[in-house]
Amino acid sequence: MADAVFLALTVITIGSAIAALELRSLIYGSIALMGTLGGVAGFFFLLDAPFVALFQLAVYVGSIAVLILFTVMLVKRELIFKKIEDKRRKFAGIGLMLVIMVALGAVFLDSGIKTMTTDEPATNFRDIGTDFVMYYWPALILMGLILAGSVTGALVLAKREDVENDQRAN
């Protein structure tokens, strides 16, 4: 059962990541980015790390992706640049991605990570989560206020003003 869920999350995460990169509409690309980040949160649930998964959902999907979505939706159309299609750039990007992935894979396989041993005891991640919420709650609240302020700032900056006879049009 866990393998089927893992495969489904993998397809959703990778598919929405590709969609976020390839969709022409910035709105749909932002929504696909939310799907990617939600899929990553699903991986954390599978790893039995619900605190990290919920933090991922709250911060990335709930705040940053929504902020990107609101900013994209509220920015005036003339400020959004036009995409120039060039097939050579697309193939160059795919080639560069493959080269980087092969290089990172070679470094990882050559690192000897499978033969590493340690004398340290296993870490209890639940204690880390408890300490994080207990001691760093002011930082979490401050981060929430900063994100709320940035959304408000984006709304103010993107506010559309139609002026007719020195009065705002409805």
Image: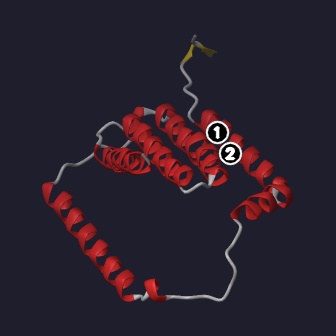
Residue 134, position as x, y percentages in the image: 85, 57
> Which residue type carries mark 1?
Val
Q: Residue furthest front?
A: 1
Residue that mark 1 sits on: 151
Front position in the image: 28 or 55: 55
Element class at badge 2:
helix
Q: Residue furthest left?
A: 87
Element class at badge 1:
helix
Residue 110, position as x, y percentages in the image: 36, 88
In the rendered view, tell whether residue 87 sits above or below residue 148.
below
Residue that mark 2 sits on: 147
Q: Are marks 2 and 1 in contact (CB under 8 Å)?
A: yes
Q: CA distance from mark 2 to mark 1?
A: 6 Å
Residue 51, position as x, y percentages in the image: 67, 51
Front position in the image: 58 or 84: 58
Lateral position of residue 139 relative to residue 20, left or right? right
> Which residue type carries mark 2?
Leu
Lateral position of residue 119 relative to residue 35, left or right? right
Lateral position of residue 153 relative to residue 90, left or right? right
Q: Residues within 10 Å of mark 2 (few under 14, many from 20)?
A: some
